[in-house]
Amino acid sequence: MKTIILVRHAKSTWDYLVDDVDRPLAESGIKDAYLVAQRFHLQSTKTDAVYSSPAARALMTSMIFMRVLNFSYTSFSVAEALYDFSGERVRHFVKNLDNTKNTVMLFGHNHAFTELANLWGNTPIENVSTAGLVQINFEVDHWKSIGQGSTTTTLFPKQLR
């Protein structure tokens, strides 16, 4: 079985005149990321690898989750393909993951993550909110074989406040 955990970056701020890739998290985004990470931690999902978009807001969100989940940084990588808003590059990335990894957590962006949550999952999701998490399980042995899976977890900050 393969499991993918999609986490959209937490709310970012537009208070700085920086390129899109360099936008940091807003204070409310930091709080929301901790909130969702703490709730997800209660599930004790064993994760084999974590990948993040190189965007500052995604990296900051991934660091919060990794601290809360006590995840080893040795199994963390930045993946340029996750700095994607359509989902095509993310989908290609996932289909080419190492099959020795059964559960992966990805930190990235919308519209891509909402599209993929609806493509792969069996629960319609109107919008993966900032700091939102969607876990999907697939009854396959190879990442290239994933198709329709089963949405097992959705955590959105608004639900947890």
Image (cartoon, rainbow, N blue to C red):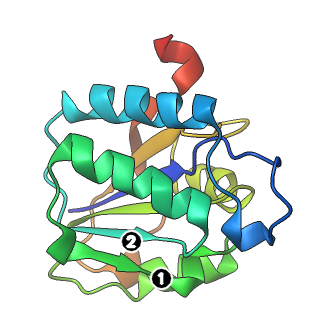
In primary-sequence order, the first of circles 1 and 2 is 2
Q: Give 121 or 76, whichever is nearer the viewer.
A: 76
Vertical order, 42 against 71 (above or below): above
Q: Which residue is rendered at x = 20% and y = 62% of the image?
A: 1
Q: Give 123 or 5, whichever is nearer the viewer.
A: 5
Can residue 101 be seen in the rendering of this structure?
yes
For label 2, the SS is strand
Q: Is residue 83 left or right of residue 160?
A: right
Q: Is residue 13 left or right of residue 79?
A: right
Give yes or no for contact between labels 1 and 2 (Cβ–Cβ under 8 Å): yes
Indicate the amino acid at tag 1: Ala
Tell me the crowding category of disc 2: few under 14, some 14 to 19, or many 20 or more residues within 10 angstroms, Cα based.
many
User: Where's residue 6, x and y in %?
Assistant: 47, 54
Label at residue 51: 2
User: Where's residue 16, x and y in %?
Assistant: 81, 55
Indicate the amino acid at tag 2: Tyr
Total labels drawn? 2
Vertical order, 136 against 59 (above or below): above
In the rendered image, which residue does mark 1 sit on? 79
Q: Among all residues in the image, which is located at the extreme right?
A: 17
Q: Which residue is rendered at x = 65% and y = 59% of the image?
A: 109
Label at residue 99: none
Gap between marks 1 and 2 measured at Cα: 6 Å
